[in-house]
Image (cartoon, helix red, strand yellow):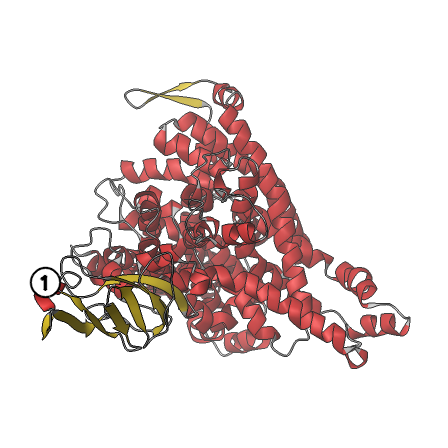
Amino acid sequence: MNPALQGLITIIIGVGGCVGYFYGANLFLDKVLLRPTGPNAGRNINRANMIRPWLFLLPALLALGLYLAYPVFATLRLSFLERLPGNEYAFVGFDNYTKMFAEPKFMEALRNNVLWLVVVPAAATGFGLLAAQLTDRLSWGNIAKSIVFMPMAISFVGAAVIFKLIYEARPEDVAQIGILNHLYLTFGGDAPVQWLQVPFWNNFFLMAVLIWIQTGFAMVILSAALRGIPEETIEAAIIDGANPFQIFFKIKIPQIMSTIVVVWTTITIATLKVFDIVFAMTNGQWETQVLANYMYDKLFRANDWGMGSASAMIIMLMVTPILVWNVYNARKEMQ
Amino acid sequence: MDAMAGRKPAVVWALNISVVLLVALWLFPTLGLFISSFRTGDQITASGWWSALFPAEQTLQIRVADPDDNRVDLGNGRFMVEGNIFEGEGFEGELNGWGTSSRRLGEFEPGATADLGDGETLTLEQDGSYVWEGDDDQISGRAQRVFLDVVTPPDFTLENYSFVLFDEDNSEGMAKAFFNTLTVVIPATIIPILIAAFAAYALAWMDFPGRAILIAVIVGLLVVPLQLALIPLLSLHNAIGIGKGYLGVWLAHTGFGLPLAIYLLRNYMVGLPRDIIENAKVDGATDFQIFTKIILPLSFPALASFAIFQFLWTWNDLLVALVFLIDASGQTTVMTKQIVELLGTRGGDWEILATSAFVSIAVPLAVFFAMQKYLVRGLLAGSVK
């Protein structure tokens, strides 16, 4: 069957099924199971109202449970198992983890991931804050913001192609078509450099891609936060003789600190899961491996589910503090 | 910064210039790819994309017409070849100067006559017409070489796009991948919205025990890396017979998109005025009616925000498609995967790479610019609380 047709049918079945389920289940509850008439009308209405939320929630809970909650436990279990021929599993305890930590490629991925976690959220938030502040009172500020925000719509893979063109190096005797090498040679470099093949520093050239994408996100949110600052605090500071830098660092930043934290943690999570950029640009060669790509290698190239799951658990472990913090804040907010 | 009235012009200038720099830094990478997609492979390797916007000076080396076939006998042992040097070259541009030796480029002005020694002459006009004259020996054998200094105007082509999108013989074309991506994206955007909207309503406006815990769980699930889901779910899909295919990828995207959908929609719905909902209840509306007739229409901005997020995310996704969709046959490849393949096989062919990448970028960019308002609103609802 033509996939487009299949897609259309799925949309109809999926949407129709969802609507049918919600409508039908609701109708069944009111008209058949617990009719709001007769001697038990009051009791029935109350019971129906107790059941109804769960009817509304059921599809979502099923999908969430199956696609997000169950895999956490299944992956945890797999990380303690070794797959044997014939779909058998053997319990190996922490073997997968110890083997993994002994692997240089894993340690490299771990080191790089930490590097990414230090650099990307800081740089993206910093640039975002700078862009938000600079464009705030500018007549063409909204156009500038749109352009900085635009990479948000571009896929990691698309961005990888874009930056590969920037980093392109060609032999010394022909014209450079990568702008970085062109600038490098113009400003006194001796020979074109394969930027993505310079160990350690190439990590930063990869990070630039994610920073370029995430800055717009940070800018949009921080710009809204900056606008939310009460005017009086700033006016008071001006009257007291504060200069623009003092106003920015001592008055504005402290007031939007909680938003900065939210932006920072959101970008941190995006950074932890970074996969496409490394996969498309270097595939972990030249010491640029990161955890998500290492995991993909283990799972689908080496077919080692034990170690693959163990490295996925490492990513989960690194996310956990943020998860706990988010849940804690959400609970606090609701009370 | 609010001391605007008292700001010095120098400061305003500095501000404008730094924003221009910032914008340039963020725009040029995409612009480079965009421009490259309209250049031929030869143009791309000959010069950087930044010089494509300006007229380019280059040196062309062309031979005049073959003397043995074209010469005209002038009598007195004199012969002549006449013609236009640009004939058959499809050349557009301006001739600045020319020469007959690679060591003396631009020796002659257009319209000048070069003395080639022993009475042999060559005259070349601005429009490319030439007259080559000499005796029997000189006007025979190999045709005279001419080195032209020309300035060509910016030259762009749509050839790359027609090759990448419409060429039937191009096995690495993007047309099929484009439709595959579309097939993944549409159901994967619509279905989670529906499911999430009902759940969000229940979490926002219906009272039941365990509601607070459920909300906390959803906030927690927001950050669970989908990397954890790959192997368990692939095994599950294989076990229940879905295997790799569209159904699997739709389900996966639905599951992964739900926490954000529920979270965004619930945050929005909670903020709707309580009076409307309570009045409706007093008037005897059921929860189902309240939801479909009041909440859904009022929540349109939040629904649009999430729809854009989910659209961008599924359109741009690589990992989920790699794991749940693309099988060994490669028939269901999506654009992101196709581009990664091209990076491997056509690493140096920038005209193909740039065009393919831009085909996949164009749709999200259009959606982005058309719906930016909703995107920003959604981001703010999701983060600033």
- The vertical placement of A233 against B30, above or below, is below
Residue at image position (70%, 74%) is B13
- Residue A275 location (% of width, % of height): 46, 43
Residue at image position (74%, 69%) is A229
- A91 vs B98, left or right, is right
- Residue B209 location (% of width, % of height): 56, 53
Asked which secondary structure carries label 1, the reply is helix
Q: Quadrant of residue B328?
A: top left
Which quarter of the figure is the C terminus of chain A placed in?
Answer: bottom right
Asked whether A204 or A171 is in front, the reply is A171
**Does the image show residue B197?**
no
- Look at mark 1 in the image and give the residue it sits on: B68
- Residue A163 location (% of width, % of height): 47, 52
Q: Quadrant of residue B41?
A: bottom left
- Binning the other alpha carbons within 10 Å of mark 1 as few (below 14), some (14 to 19) or many (20 upward) gives few
Asked whether A258 or B205 is in front, the reply is A258
Disc 1 marks a residue whose amino acid type is Asp
- The vertical placement of A48 against A111, above or below, is below
Asked whether B58 or B377 is in front, the reply is B58
